[in-house]
Image: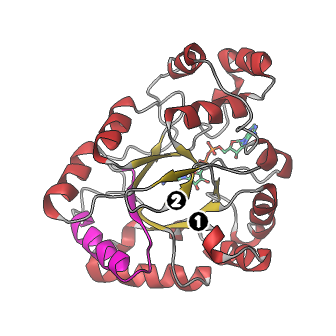
Amino acid sequence: TQVPNITLNTGAAMPQLGYGVFQVPADEVVAPVRAALEAGYRSIDTAAVYGNEEGVGRAIAESGIAREDLFVTTKLWNDKQGYDSALKGFDESLERLGLDYVDLYLIHWPVAAKDQYVDTWKAFQKLHADGRAKAIGVSNFQIPHLKRLFEETDIVPAVNQIELHPNLPQAELRAFHAEHGIATEAWSPLGQGKGLLDDATLASLGEKYGKSPAQIVLRWHLQLGNVVIPKSVTPSRIEENIEVFDFELADDDVAAITALETGVRVGPDPDTFG
Ligand code: NAD
């Protein structure tokens, strides 16, 4: 399967679907990343705090896929915020990945209570200027956090990676991103599987289109314009989750999925976490 790209505000191409490795233990990550690369995924999403950057790097190296054909994202953890410590955190991630650049580097959480994300972003701007982070972005930023970056720094984030799924469609943030040229990347795009994928609406749409509920949800994201990074360690599901480019949901079916909004998060509240 060939995954289409979106164009970031840097001009770089980013695959609209990638593979996320949250909660995959370090000693178990190589096999599923290999399975994802074999299935056609070219974008991998990890983070320093996931503790598995080394394994991700090993799977990439062993794949033999040319570096320029891959899109690697990692993230700075909260305890490394601040200008100097962010630069150091980046060096450590790059070393663990065994790479000389990443395609996208994200501030994992704003941690507004510590008020260091502006200085952290200035370090990210340096990493970008040095060519070691081809694109820089943020994760879990709310509109006021983004506005502060616009006011106090020079580069508009390429991406904001946020919790987003049918129970939390994030209409306001998506519209704000679109207005400012920021790509919306959905984490926990399947709502972590539990509950959401048992929904009756998704089951009946699955029957209508001959697809699984997970595939229906991923297709909904793609048609909204989101980048998605579903996670599974099961090879058959890794393959299933990329087989979403051969059908299209009707507009009223997209709307029916968006109507599953409950506002309930599966992860922490970005205004207070960290
Ligand atoms: P997800 O929504 O991708 O759900 C993953 C779970 O859904 C799996 O563990 C499995 O139980 C189930 N599942 C997957 N494919 C399925 C299928 N085809 N059929 C049935 N069930 C299926 O949740 P996630 O792992 O939390 O999020 C995906 C990625 O987002 C992570 O791996 C990570 O890379 C990223 N993430 C980022 C943040 C952040 O703060 N930036 C937070 C959480 C996750």
Q: What x and y, as percent, mark residue 123?
A: 29, 76
Label 2 CB sits under 8 Å from any ligand 1 atom? no
Q: Depth check: 226 or 257 in front?
A: 226
| Residue with the mark numbered 2 | 13
Q: Quadrant of residue 246?
A: top right
The answer to whether 187 appears left or right of 64 in the picture is: left
Q: Is mark 2 on a helix, strand or loop?
A: strand
- Between disc 1 and disc 2, whose residue precedes? 2
Amino acid bearing label 2: Ala
Q: What x and y, as percent, mark residue 147?
A: 20, 50
The answer to whether 259 appears left or right of 96 in the picture is: left
Q: Quadrant of residue 90?
A: bottom left
Quadrant in which the C terminus is drawn: bottom left
Q: Depth check: 51 or 74 in front?
A: 74
| Residue with the mark numbered 1 | 71
Judged from this view, the residue extending furthest toward the right is 236
Determine the residue positioned at 50% across, 17% down.
259
Q: Do the residues labelled 1 and 2 touch (CB within 8 Å)?
A: yes
Q: What x and y, as percent, mark residue 9?
A: 37, 57
Q: Can residue 148 be seen in this view?
A: yes
Q: Quadrant of residue 61?
A: bottom right
Determine the residue positioned at 41% across, 80% down.
131
Vertically, is 178 above or below 47?
A: above
Q: Which of marks 1 and 2 is in front?
A: 2
Q: From which residue to which does the magenta span run?
A: 116-140
